């Protein structure tokens, strides 16, 4: 056993991740490949363990952001197809081939460069997916079908396996941007088909268009990330369809109590004296702060769960410490755990609630849990 006790840690339920994956497959049906997104260390759930679990459960594809993330999965023995979504730098092309990663390519120049490399390395057929910028205005080609077809046809070793796009406003049923993006994408897809080019996979959907049943955007493959970890935006803008997907968070986050004490009325707590005790009270100091990922914006306004009851964060969240009100959990002592995110005694705090209070998004709360927070699989 380690001499180091845990100061702050997350507990990840691999069983819940499997259940969420099953729910996604059940909803989308047998004709649709569910490709879990395990980028950013699987939204901090641990890319290797999550990928192993999903592969064991039957995932044939996984998606990452970078070549380095893909290579790490290969080094860990993952055999599923791995799609690298967030582009690569010219110096990384060799590694894509070496690690048997499938790139998403975002320009026709890069298609030509990929083909030239595959040809030089005799690595045929070198599959790639091409991303269409259908209106997100970030990565992706804005070329038309004719120009794309010409480039695809000129390739001798690179093989167009997938055509994809990404939505800017998937949860918006008012503005029409998603419908417009689907139209743009379908126009290009039909144009290519008319020219004899029909890649095996078309994919447009992350978690939200799956959960809210934009079936016209499912294609032959979907790319859920957040939903794999148990999160779906609880509402959409406008009169969207009923949410069809039921998933549950797989991660809970705890911190140890380092110290407890009683303070008199009028005592200040933490940097800037932001909190002043209105009456004598009992406080606890937690062994986690913003360096662990607790948003600084939770200072004097966030909550944790202590002894199964909500407990307010008092004063500023500091780098390594956070102070809480122990009025409703006076029995807690050093070494006891409190819940920063998760469920305890029937009280629940999830990443979406934290995000609302902190003025951010649930994705950022999860990805913000820092590397020094230990991970335990349950
Ligand atoms: C991150 C990402 C996803 C997954 O998005 P979620 O909202 O987490 O489901 C899908 N596609 C692309 C291109 C992404 O970058």
Image (spheres, rainbow, N blue to C red):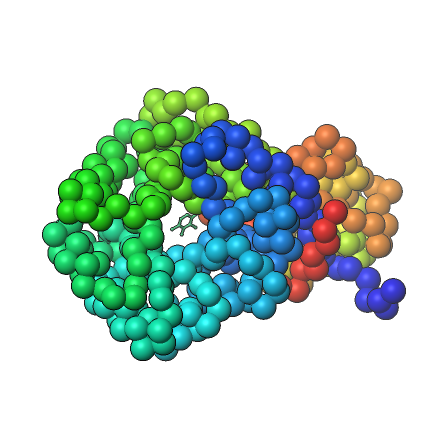
| Residue 23 in picture, x, y percent from top left | 56, 32
Q: Position of residue 216 (x, y in %)?
A: 32, 31
Q: Is residue 272 visible?
A: no
Q: Quadrant of residue 376?
A: bottom right
In this rendering, position of residue 370 left or right of residue 335? left
Tell me what residue is drawn at x 42 percent, y 69 percent: 96
Q: Nearer the viewer, residue 350 or 43?
A: 43
Of residues 310 and 120, the one nearer the viewer is: 120
Left or right: where 306 falls relative to 354: right
**Number of labelled discs?**
0
Q: Residue at horizontal 74%, vertical 47%?
A: 378
Whole-percent x, y for residue 334 in the image: 84, 54
Visible residue check, residue 58: yes
- Residue name at image x 36 percent, y 30 percent: 214
The residue lying at 47 percent from left, 33 percent from top is 30
Give residue 301's quadrant in the image: top right
Percent coordinates x, y for residue 13 in the rendering: 69, 44
């Amino acid at each position: 056993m380690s001499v180091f006790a845990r100061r702050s840690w997350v507990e990840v339920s691999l069983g819940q991740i499997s259940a969420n994956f099953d729910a996604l497959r059940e909803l989308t049906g047998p004709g649709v490949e569910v490709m879990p997104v395990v980028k950013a260390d699987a939204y901090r759930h641990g890319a290797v363990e999550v990928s192993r679990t999903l592969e064991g459960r039957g995932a044939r594809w996984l998606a990452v952001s970078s070549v380095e993330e893909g290579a790490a999965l290969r080094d860990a023995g993952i055999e599923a197809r791995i799609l690298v979504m967030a582009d690569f730098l010219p110096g990384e092309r060799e590694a894509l081939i070496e690690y048997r990663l499938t790139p998403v390519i975002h320009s026709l120049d890069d298609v030509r460069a990929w083909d030239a490399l595959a040809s030089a390395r005799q690595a045929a057929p070198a599959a790639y997916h091409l991303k269409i910028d259908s209106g997100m205005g970030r990565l992706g080609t804005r070329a038309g079908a004719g120009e794309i077809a010409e480039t695809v046809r000129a390739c001798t070793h690179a093989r167009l396996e997938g055509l994809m796009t990404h939505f800017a406003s998937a949860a918006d049923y008012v503005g029409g941007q998603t419908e417009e993006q689907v139209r743009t994408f379908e126009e290009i897809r039909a144009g290519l088909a008319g020219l004899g080019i029909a890649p095996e996979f078309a994919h447009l959907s992350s978690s939200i268009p799956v959960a809210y049943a934009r079936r016209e955007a499912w294609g032959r493959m979907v790319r859920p990330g957040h939903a794999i970890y148990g999160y779906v935006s609880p509402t959409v803008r406008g009169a969207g369809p009923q949410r069809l997907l039921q998933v549950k968070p797989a991660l809970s986050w705890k911190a140890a109590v380092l110290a407890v004490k009683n303070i008199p009325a009028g005592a200040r707590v933490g940097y800037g004296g932001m909190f002043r005790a209105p009456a004598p009270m009992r406080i606890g100091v937690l062994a986690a702060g913003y360096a662990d990922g607790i948003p600084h914006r939770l200072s004097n306004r966030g909550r944790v769960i202590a002894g199964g009851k909500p407990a307010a964060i008092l004063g500023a969240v500091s780098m390594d410490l956070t102070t809480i009100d122990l009025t409703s959990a006076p029995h807690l002592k050093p070494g006891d755990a409190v819940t920063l995110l998760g469920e305890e005694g029937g009280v629940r705090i999830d990443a979406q609630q934290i995000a609302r209070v902190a003025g951010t998004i649930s994705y950022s709360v999860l990805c913000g849990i820092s590397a020094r927070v230990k991970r335990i699989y349950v």
